[in-house]
Image (cartoon, rainbow, N blue to C red):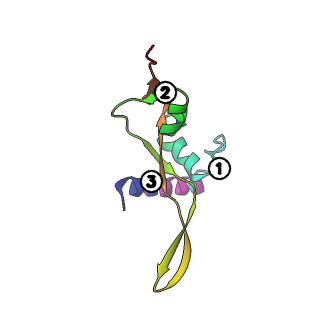
Amino acid sequence: MSPTRAKLIEMSKHVKALQEICSDELEGCACETTNQMVMHVFYPEGEFKTYRAWLEEGQQVKKGSKAFPVWGRKRKVAVKDGGEESQYKFFPTANLFHESQVEAVEVEA
């Protein structure tokens, strides 16, 4: 298991426990998913996007910036086990970058 995935699993466990214990304190939080809770508790406020999404907006992620991991979309993965094929659900990790980590791309004339 990658260190990023292990870290994200630990953060997810923490926020799920926090949801159970502190539901009254989180009343103002519009967090419906584990990703939203992880971002609310562990990451700075502001806009987050994927590397590609920032590029599409004319922004370049600054060199040396570290991504903020979140859970990606659930995937079904086919596995062959001794000739039988079965499927299971897999949550990959995705990387987001904060608005403070980008700068406008300079266009050469």
Q: Earlier in the sequence, mark 3 or mark 1?
A: 3
Task: Say which mark, if any, is on residue 8.
Answer: 3
**Residue 59 bears which disc, if any?**
2
**As displayed, is residue 79 above or below residue 46?**
below
Residue numbers of the magenta segment: 10-20
Question: Outermost residue, left direction?
Answer: 64
Q: Position of residue 75 (x, y in %)?
A: 56, 62
- Mark 1: few/some/many CA within 10 Å (<14, 14-19, 20+): few
Position of 22 relative to 46 (above/below): below
| Neighbourhood count class around disc 3 (C-alpha, 10 Å): few under 14, some 14–19, many 20 upward | some
SS type, badge 3: helix
Q: Amino acid at mark 1?
A: Glu
Compute the Cα span from label 3 to label 2: 26 Å
State yes or no: residue 2 in magenta.
Answer: no
Q: Amino acid at mark 3?
A: Leu
User: What amino acid is at disc 2?
Assistant: Gln
Residue at x-position 37% and y-position 62%: 1
Estimate the spatial distance between the alpha carbons at disc 3 and disc 1, rounded to whole Å.
17 Å
| Outermost residue toward the front in this view | 109
Asked if one can make out residue 3 in the rendered structure from this viewpoint, the answer is yes
Badge 2 or badge 1: first in the primary sequence: 1
Q: Main secondary structure of the magenta part?
A: helix
Disc 2 packing (10 Å; few <14; some 14–19; many ≥20): some
Q: Which residue is mark 1?
A: 32
- For the C terminus, the image quarter is top left
Q: In the image, 62: left or right of 55?
A: left
| Circle 2 SS class | strand
- Tell whether 57 sits left or right of 103: right
